[in-house]
Image (cartoon, helix red, strand yellow):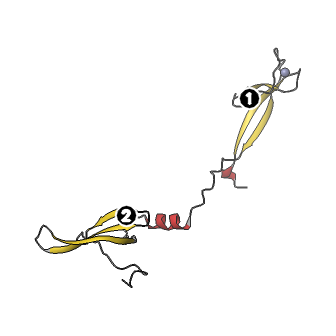
Amino acid sequence: MDRQATAETTYQVWYCKRCDKACKIQPPTIEPGCRCENPVPGLRPTLVTQMHQPKLRPMQALTEEEGRLRALARKGRRVQVTYEAEISEAWISPGRDGVKRIQFIVTTADGRRHVVDPALPGLHVEAAPDGEQG
Ligand SMILES: [Zn+2]
């Protein structure tokens, strides 16, 4: 067993002479078992060493996808962010520079609509793998 994984606590325990249960514990971190109205503690305490297993955090099984995303999460890393959606509307309108460009409203699988402005820096729109036939 890994030594660092366990901790020990030593208590002084006075056992009650009436019920043989602990009636006084120093340090008082555990509950005495004695319920006598007038406990009769023994003269000498007994040293009790308790081993503590550190509480294991419930293993949250990291999904493969979450693990993959966490591995990516590093400042400065270049990533490509894509989502798949269906073109719901498209129109051509002049931008601030007066040049006419196409814009889309797309609908993702959850039914939400998103405005997609391909003129945004870094944004790139292409056909989904199954979307070539259109
Ligand atoms: Zn007792």
* Residue for point 76% across, 30% down: 12
Residue 124 or residue 129, whichever sits in front: 129
Rounded to the nearest angstrom, the CA distance separating label 1 from label 2 is: 50 Å
Q: Is mark 1 within 8 Å of ligand 1?
A: no
Q: From the viewer's perspective, is residue 49 above or below residue 81?
A: above
Q: Position of residue 109 (x, y in %)?
A: 43, 66
The amino acid type found where label 1 is placed reads Glu
Classify residue 28 as left or right of residue 65: right
Tag 1–tag 2 contact (CB < 8 Å): no
* Residue for point 69% across, 31% down: 29
Q: Which residue is mark 2?
A: 75
Asked which secondary structure carries label 1, the reply is: loop
Classify residue 22 as left or right of residue 90: right
Classify residue 89 as left or right of residue 4: left
The quadrant of the picture occupied by the C terminus is bottom left
Neighbourhood count class around disc 2 (C-alpha, 10 Å): few under 14, some 14–19, many 20 upward: few
Q: Which numbered disc flags the more N-terminal residue, 1 or 2?
A: 1
Neighbourhood count class around disc 1 (C-alpha, 10 Å): few under 14, some 14–19, many 20 upward: few
Q: Which residue is mark 1?
A: 31
Does the image show residue 78? no
Q: From the viewer's perspective, is residue 62 above or below residue 51?
A: below
Q: From the viewer's perspective, is residue 86 above or below residue 113?
A: below
* Residue for point 41% across, 63% down: 111
Q: Position of residue 125 (x, y in %)?
A: 31, 76
The amino acid type found where label 2 is placed reads Lys
Does the image show residue 67? yes
